Amino acid sequence: MDTILKAEELQKSYFNKKALQGVNLTIQQGKIVGLLGPNGSGKTTFLKIAAGILHPSSGTILIDGQEPGVYTKSIVSYLPDTEYFFKWMKIKDAVQYFKDFYTDFDERKAFELLEFMKLDVNSSIKSLSKGMKEKLKLTLVLARKAKLYILDEPLGGVDPTAREKILDAIINNFSGNSSMIITTHLVNDIERIFDDVAFINDGVIVLQGNAEELRQSKNKSIDELYREVFQ
Amino acid sequence: MLNLIKYEIRGKLLTILGICLTVIIGNLFLMTKVSSGGIGIPLLSTVLGIGALIVISISTLTIMSDYLYDDQGYLLFTLPQSGVSILASRLITAVIQISIVGIVSLAMFCLLDQGRTWNAMLQGATLPEMLYSILMYLWTIVSTLTFIYFCMVIGRIALKGKKIGKIGSFIIFFILSIVRNGLAFLIANFFPQIVQFDSVTTVTMNIGSTLFDVMIFGLLFMATSYLLEHKVDL
């Protein structure tokens, strides 16, 4: 099986604070990986490095065999936990923006997802609620035929009904040729879709493995295991 | 890169329109006072035009700072675009913005002045001199903004906080300006050879300091492109 992401001894320091302290992580093609940890554990830092918008202090990270850069950005579809759209944009402008910049963007799929999410293409983005913006971001990210999807807190700030909708969208639109890495605090809601999980604390991976094997060997759900590791 | 320019212009459209409308309305108002104003009216129109150019120039600086310090950076820096594309698109966008406002201001001034100053400027000017003026206009915008963008990017990388980064960028700009101008002065003294054009006014260009400026621009452009692509952390 092909490796889509390989991080070795990845470190990131901010002045005297070490956000990552030698992360080793491999993601295989076709897998959905949950990167789980409490606030400040280094999850977002890791994802931002993989997305190419943060640069490691030391160590290596390769995506499809290459260091983060122009090529990897063309094959990585990244959902940040920020609201990054231009204020003047309507939903249709955001769709056009992705179409203009990403050759792997599937406009037809984007409109299908917008319909599924019940979002009106003529709506102004600044008029959308936080949950609707989250759905829009996810729509655009999933409408790409990327090799690696990076989702940072895709369920953050959305109500339980919207969570289900978002999870359904993720599952229905994930293809076996791609890989996905997801961070979340809402482990219980999302653990059913994970193939592998990695627990991160203080910038170090403290436990990782196949989700089903971990459940069986520890006789616990991933959510229970998460609470045990980070209690 | 064309798409980057397209979206940048679209984002600044309201600003450009607002400034142009202000210039047009301001000049129309001045036209109603022409009969009573004497030389003061064209002067006020010039002040209005310069003010508009200052505002749009400041707006071109936010083209870079918004991406360096605000969440919009996530939209730009996750695109599969090289640092050269990003920087070149910012510079081209700035030239377009400033030119639109400049042309509107000049056109309104000419209407107000009934073309007298414009005709006087063109009288005796040859095609090479006009091309030289256009080239100098583009060069001034592009080289100045490249220098400022470099300072902004350095400030962002070296100083992580938004406020301290912006203040730091200004200090870096101040120091590097002194160094650059000092070096240009020394070079101009060491290599005093000049080129001179006699036209409406006499234009003198020191060969040594001009080559130095071109070299500095090239270095700063490549350095800023590299830093944008490889060193900026969001």
Image: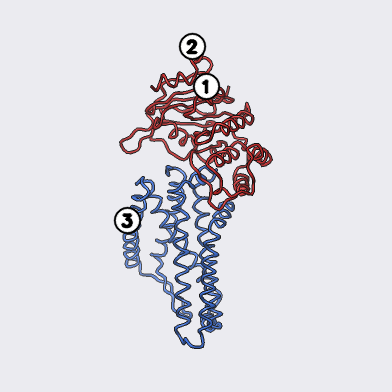
Chain colours: A red, B blue
- Residue found at x 42% / y 26%: A200
Disc 2/disc 3 C-alpha distance (Å): 59 Å
Answer yes or no: do the residues labelled 2 and 3 have beta carbons within 8 Å? no
What whole-number distance in Å separates the C-alpha atoms at marks 3 and 1?
49 Å
Q: Nearer the viewer, residue A14 or B184?
A: A14
Give the mark nearest the N terminus, 2 or 1: 1
Helix, strand or loop status at disc 2: helix
The x and y percentages for residue A154 are 53, 34
B144 versus B233 height, above or below: below
Spatial CA distance of label 2 from label 1 is 14 Å
Can you tell which quarter of the image residue B21 is in?
bottom right
Q: Which mark is residue B171?
A: 3
Which residue position is annotated with label 2? A217
Q: Are marks 2 and 3 on the same chain?
A: no
The residue depicted at 38 percent of the width and 35 percent of the height is: A57
Q: Tell me, yes or no, whether the two marked residues, 2 and 1, touch with CB atoms within 8 Å.
A: no
The amino acid marked with disc number 3 is: Ile
Give, as a three-letter code, the residue at label 1. Asp
Secondary structure beneath label 1: strand
Q: Which-is-in-front pick, marks 3 and 1? A: 1
Image quadrant in which the N terminus of chain A is located: top right
Indicate the position of residue B224 as horizontal and vertical percent values.
Answer: 43, 50
Q: Is residue B206 above or below residue A1?
A: below
Mark 2 or 1: in front is 2
The three-letter code of the residue at mark 2 reads Ser
Q: Both on one chain, marks 2 and 1? A: yes
Q: Which of these two is toward me, A201 or A59?
A: A201
Callout 3: SS: helix
Residue under label 1, please give it: A196
Front one among A213 and A30: A213
Q: Is residue B185 left or right of residue A66?
A: left
Query: Which residue occupies 30% across, 36% down?
Result: A16
